[in-house]
């Protein structure tokens, strides 16, 4: 359909009416994702703090810290390196 109007002279807005059960499922999934993201940030911070304390107090190697925390030594190295950049 052709209109005698410039393409940028109007806006088109689309909305979708969803079944309430789908809307509820979407809301639940989004809330769970936000909660997951929060817990993940907390877990990463606790992992960083544990790695720092083990290194400072225990004097263990990066590989040993990774083994204790069940994380690859590469990830421990990255975590400790990232913290040094922030400090």
Image: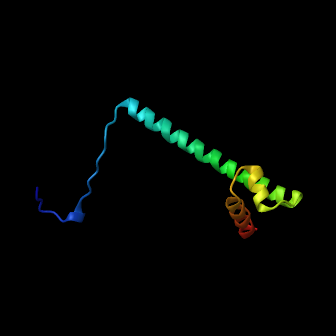
Name the residue at the right extreme: 57
Task: Say which residue appears at 67% left-offset and 59% top-offset.
Answer: 75
Q: Residue at x 54, y 39 (%)?
A: 32
Q: Quadrant of residue 73?
A: bottom right
Relative horizontal placement of residue 20, taking residue 66 as reference (left or right) = left
Q: Position of residue 53 (x, y in %)?
A: 83, 56
Percent across and percent down for residue 48 are 74, 56
Residue 35 left/right relative to 72: left
Q: Where residue 84 appears, x then y in whole percent?
A: 75, 68
Please tell me whether residue 60 is drawn above or below residue 46 in the rendered image: below
Quarter of the C terminus within the rendering: bottom right
Name the image quarter holding residue 16: top left
Residue 64 x, y percent position in the rendering: 79, 56
What sort of colour scheme is used for the picture? Answer: rainbow
Determine the residue positioned at 34% across, 31% down. 19
Residue placed most toward the observer, 41 or 48: 48
Q: Is residue 64 left or right of residue 1?
A: right
The residue lying furthest to the bottom in this view is: 85
Picture quarter with the N terminus: bottom left
Q: Work out which residue is located at the far top of the displayed protein and give it.
A: 21
> For the image shown, how many numbered marks are present on the structure?
0
Residue at the image point whose x is 74% and y is 50% from the top: 69
């Amino acid at each position: 359909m052709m209109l005698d109007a410039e393409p940028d002279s109007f806006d088109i807005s689309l909305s979708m009416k969803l079944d309430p059960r789908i809307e509820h499922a979407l809301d639940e999934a989004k809330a769970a994702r936000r909660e997951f993201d929060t817990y993940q940030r907390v877990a990463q911070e606790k992992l960083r703090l544990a790695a720092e304390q083990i290194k400072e107090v225990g004097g263990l190697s990066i590989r040993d810290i990774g083994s204790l925390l069940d994380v690859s030594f590469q990830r421990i190295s990255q975590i400790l390196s990232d913290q040094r950049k922030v400090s």
